[in-house]
Amino acid sequence: FNMCRESGDHGPFNSWDKQVYVVNLNGAEGTVIKDYDIISFNFMIANYNSQEAIDNDDGSCYYDTHHNVFIYSGNGMKNDFGGHDNHHHDNIYAYVGIGFRINSQLSGHEDRFYNNTVVMLSDGDYGKGQQCTGSSQTILHDNAIFSPNGNVTECGKSLADWQKEGFDRGTTAATYPSDMVLLNKMTNLLNVVDD
């Protein structure tokens, strides 16, 4: 559940990148580039009308978020104010506004959003803020997007038209799955065993 409840500008998880630490990592002496933080195998509910499921705020970087179930929020993945290298994969975002809302990144430091299941509350864009052109395009592929009518858009075009241009390969759009299908996907993802 949300740990920060004084506003809706957070989620069940919130990070900031305002303080630089110098570390010795992987043989590199005195680097400010940290290793990836891992967020995995969690069931998080974004209650109190949360803005994000995972709020990588204010330049947060190097997060590998995978094999989680996130219920409710305006955005699944958030990354802003210079954030980069945030990877979300193999997650389920259920009953969210959109899958992600991010900022642009530098080439070689792109965010990644792939192999996720997103159940959106309405038709339309499944993400906002991604780089649609250039050398630092956000890496998107193999997501399963569900919406009321299965009408999903990306970068100002229908998903089908965007894919015809060679982008976001393997991502599908469909109408809502049944509650039982979604529940089974969640329990399988988290390896929940019924004794």
Image (spheres, rainbow, N blue to C red):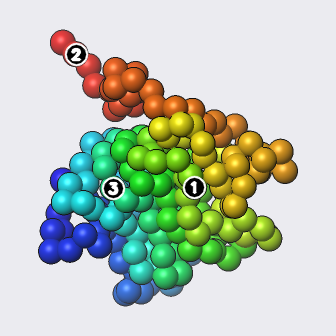
Check if mark 3's residue and mark 1's residue have beta carbons within 8 Å. Answer: no
Amino acid identity at mark 1? Asp
Task: Report helix, strand or loop for mark 2.
Answer: loop
Query: What residue is shown at x 35% (from left), y 30% (from top)?
Result: 186
Task: Report helix, strand or loop for mark 1.
Answer: strand
For the residue pair 31 and 64, the one nearer the viewer reads as: 64
Measure the C-alpha gap from mark 3 to mark 2. 28 Å
The residue beneath circle 1 is: 125
Q: What residue occupies the far bottom of the structure in this picture?
A: 19
Q: Nearer the viewer, mark 3 or mark 2?
A: 3
For the residue pair 162 and 190, the one nearer the viewer reads as: 162
Q: Position of residue 81 (x, y in %)?
A: 49, 82
The residue beneath circle 3 is: 73
The residue beneath circle 2 is: 194
Q: Quadrant of residue 67?
A: top left
Q: Position of residue 120 (x, y in %)?
A: 45, 46
Q: Which sits earlier in the primary sequence, circle 3 or circle 1?
A: 3
For the residue pair 194 and 34, the one nearer the viewer reads as: 194
Q: Which sits earlier in the primary sequence, circle 3 or circle 2?
A: 3
Q: Position of residue 26 (x, y in %)?
A: 53, 66
Where is 17 relative to 109, above or below? below
What is the crowding at mark 3: few (fewer than 14 residues within 10 Å), some, or many (at least 20)? many
Q: Is residue 90 left or right of residue 57?
A: right
Query: What residue is shown at x 40% (from left), y 69% (from top)?
Result: 56
Amino acid identity at mark 3? Ser
Q: What residue occupies the far front of the structure in this picture?
A: 149
Amino acid identity at mark 2? Asp
Q: Is residue 172 visible?
A: yes
Q: Nearer the viewer, mark 3 or mark 1?
A: 1
